[in-house]
Image (spheres, grey):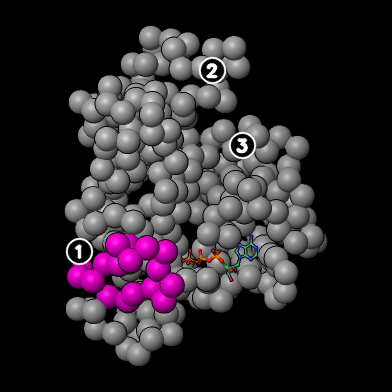
C-alpha cells in the first residue's frame, strides 16, 4: 500500500502557482529524498501532506496518507486530526521546549494520544516514561534523558525531535531540512538515526535535503522538484551530474563539487565536501 498518494496538487499563494499539478506516491517503509533548489516547492509540498496547507480547489486534487484522505479538492478531510496523529514532523529548528528535560520533550510526543487532564508534565504514566526512554535509546541519547533540552548540541536536539516523533508512534515522518543547520558530523548522526528508524521500525520517511550527497548516501529514491513541478522521480543512482546541473540550473558540476543551494537558510547548513 502507498503510504502517501498525491494527485494533481496545485497551489498558488498570491500570484503564479508554486506547485503545478504534482502527482507522486511513496511506498510504505520507503525513505525518500525530496530535493530541488531553493524555492522549488519542497516545504510547500510537505505542508500539504499533513494538511497544514490546503491546495487550490481542483477537481482531481487529492492527498492521502496511510490510505486516509488528508485533503481533497483543496478541503481538509473531516477526520484530518486522526491522520495527523500518525504523521511525525521533524523541522530544521528542532522545536523543543528548552527549559524542559529531554525526556519530557520526548513525552510531549504522546500528547494527542493521552487525555487532556493528564497532558501536563508529571502526569505521564510509568509505561509512557519507559517508552520515552526506549525512544531515546534508539536515537542514542538515553543517558541525556534528565538534562535540560537546551544543554544539548543542535544535532542531539534534532535526535530528540526524532525520538518525540517515535513517542508519537508516527508511521510517517516528514523531515523538512532536518540537517540544514548542522555540521557534517551531526548531520551524519541525524541521517543515520532517520535511516535506523526507517529500517528497524518500518517508518516511512520523507526528508527534504539541500545536500544531494546525503540523499545519495541514505535514500534509494529521490523526487526532485523544479519550479513547482516534478523534474525527477526515480532511483537515486539515476541522478547523474547532468540531471543535477539542469535541476539546480548550474553549470555542469563534478562529483567533487556538490551542488550548493542558491538560498541557504543558514550559512552553517552549507556542505562543501561530499560526505
Ligand atoms: N505562505 C506563503 N505565502 C506566500 N508564498 C509562499 C508561502 N510559502 C511558500 N511560498 C512561496 O512558494 C515558493 C516555494 O517555497 P518553498 O518554501 O516550498 O520552497 P523550498 O523548495 O522548500 O525552498 P527552500 O529549499 O529554500 O526551503 C517560494 O516562491 C515561496 O516564496
The percent position of residue 46, horizontal first and vertical second, equals 54, 55
Magenta residues, dominant SS class: loop
Locate residue 253, reporting x and y percent: 29, 85
| Distance CA(mark 2)–CA(mark 3) | 20 Å
The quarter in which the C terminus is drawn is bottom left
**Residue 128 lies in quadrant:** top left
Q: Which residue is at a point 50% across and 54% down the rendered structure image?
A: 26
* Residue 179, x across and y down, in percent: 33, 55
> Of helix, strand and loop, which one carries label 1?
loop
Q: CA distance from mark 1 to mark 3?
A: 35 Å
Give residue 86's quadrant in the image.
top right
Residue nearest the observer in this picture, 108 or 275: 108
Q: Is residue 260 magenta?
A: yes
Say which quarter of the image contains residue 158: top left
In the image, 11 versus 14, the foreground residue is: 14
> Does 23 sit above or below residue 164?
below
Camera-near label (1 vs 3) is 1
Above or below for 111 versus 76: above
Range shown magenta = 258-275
Residue beneath the point at 30% across and 62% down: 268
The answer to whether the residues at label 1 and label 3 have Cβ atoms under 8 Å apart is no
Mark 2 vs mark 1: which is more N-terminal? 2
* Crowd band around label 1 with a 10 angstrom C-alpha radius: few (<14), some (14–19), many (20+): some
Ligand 1, seen in the image, is in the quarter at bottom right
Q: Are marks 2 and 1 in contact (CB under 8 Å)?
A: no
Can residue 201 be seen here? The reply is no
Image mark for residue 83: 3
Report whether residue 42 is seen: yes
Residue shown at 60%/46% (left/top)? Answer: 50
Q: Residues within 10 Å of mark 3 (few under 14, many from 20)?
A: some
Lower sequence index among marks 2 and 3: 3
Q: Sequence order check: which comes first, mark 1 or mark 3? A: 3
Amino acid at each position: 500500500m502507498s503510504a502517501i498518494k498525491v494527485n494533481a496538487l496545485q497551489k498558488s499563494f498570491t500570484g503564479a502557482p508554486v506547485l503545478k499539478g504534482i502527482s507522486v506516491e511513496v511506498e510504505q517503509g520507503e525513505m525518500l529524498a525530496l530535493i530541488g533548489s531553493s524555492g522549488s516547492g519542497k516545504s510547500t509540498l510537505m505542508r500539504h501532506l499533513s494538511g497544514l496547507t490546503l491546495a487550490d480547489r481542483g477537481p482531481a486534487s487529492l492527498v492521502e496518507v496511510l490510505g486516509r484522505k488528508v485533503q481533497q479538492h483543496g478541503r481538509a478531510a473531516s477526520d484530518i486530526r486522526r491522520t495527523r496523529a500518525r504523521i511525525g514532523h521533524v523541522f530544521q529548528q528542532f522545536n523543543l521546549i528548552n527549559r524542559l528535560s529531554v525526556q519530557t520533550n520526548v513525552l510531549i510526543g504522546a500528547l494527542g494520544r493521552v487525555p487532556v487532564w493528564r497532558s501536563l508534565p508529571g502526569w505521564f504514566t510509568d509505561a509512557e516514561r519507559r517508552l520515552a526512554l526506549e525512544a531515546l535509546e534508539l536515537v542514542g541519547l538515553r543517558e541525556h534523558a534528565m538534562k535540560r533540552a537546551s544543554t544539548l548540541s543542535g544535532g542531539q536536539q534534532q535526535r530528540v525531535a526524532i525520538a518525540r516523533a517515535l513517542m508519537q508512534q508516527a508511521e510517517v515522518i516528514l523531515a523538512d531540512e532536518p540537517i540544514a543547520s548542522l555540521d557534517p558530523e551531526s548531520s551524519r548522526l541525524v541521517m543515520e538515526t532517520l535511516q535506523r528508524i526507517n529500517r528497524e521500525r518500518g517508518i516511512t520517511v520523507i526528508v527534504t535535503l539541500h545536500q544531494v550527497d546525503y540523499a545519495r548516501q541514505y535514500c534509494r529514491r529521490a523526487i526532485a522538484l523544479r519550479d513547482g513541478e516534478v523534474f525527477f522521480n526515480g532511483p537515486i543512482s539515476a541522478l547523474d551530474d547532468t540531471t543535477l546541473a539542469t535541476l539546480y540550473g548550474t553549470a555542469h558540476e563534478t562529483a567533487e563539487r556538490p551542488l550548493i543551494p542558491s538560498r541557504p537558510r543558514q550559512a552553517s547548513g552549507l556542505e562543501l565536501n561530499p560526505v
